[in-house]
Amino acid sequence: MSKTFEMTGIIHSMGATTTYGNNGFTKREFVLKATGADENSSYPNYVAFELIKEKCSLLDQYNVGEELQVSFNISGRLWQAQDKPERCFTSLQVWRINRADQNQPGAQMQQSQPNYDQSYQSNNPVPSQQMAAAANKSAPQPSSTSFSNDDWDDDIPF
């Protein structure tokens, strides 16, 4: 299982979906220019990503210049041609794409989460005096016991 990474950036370029081999393997590549508070605009980072198989269509609804947040996994493999040195190929395989403005903290989550307190109160009316009494009840307090070094019979050698 691989770890998931996320990055926000502006679409710099998008390639067309390409089919490889007889089995119909499809792949689509695109490049993001990294954005965010920790990015230095004097030295922009351009990162190449790929979409594979059914994920190729995720990019269809976006255009060059739009800011996206992508979720991706890192994948790598070794390859060696006859009489050639071994090579390592690394791929950043995207599996989810969202517009960057949809990923602001709380922007989408607050709208989709119901207010459970409100629905509970409307289904279970409780007089305010009962609620106040319940809030004032205190949980049992643990007894306070002090331990000294003499109380421990510790046979652990460290």
Image (cartoon, grey):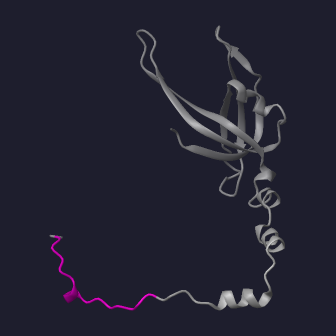
User: Is residue 62 depicted above or below 77 in this figure?
Assistant: below
Q: Is residue 99 left or right of residue 96?
A: right
Residue under the image location 62 percent in, 90 percent down: 137
* In-image side of 155 versus 79 (left or right): left
Q: In which quarter of the image is residue 125?
A: bottom right
Q: Nearer the viewer, residue 96 or 70?
A: 96
Q: Nearer the viewer, residue 80 or 119?
A: 119
**Which quadrant of the figure has residue 95?**
top right
In magenta, the rendered stretch is 142-156
Residue at 65%, 38% in the rendered image: 47
Residue 43 percent coordinates (x, y): 66, 47
Residue 52 in the image: x percent, y percent? 67, 26
x and y, in percent, of residue 12 in the image: 76, 36
> Which residue is rendered at x = 78% and y = 60% of the image?
113
Image point 71% across, 30% down: which residue?
55
**Against 41, is 73 above or below?**
above
**In magenta stretch: residue 7:** no
The quadrant in which residue 86 appears is: top left
- Which of 48 and 146 lies nearest the eye of the viewer? 146
Q: How many labels does the image show?
A: 0
Please name the predominant secondary structure of the magenta segment in the image: loop
Where's the C terminus, which quadrant? Answer: bottom left
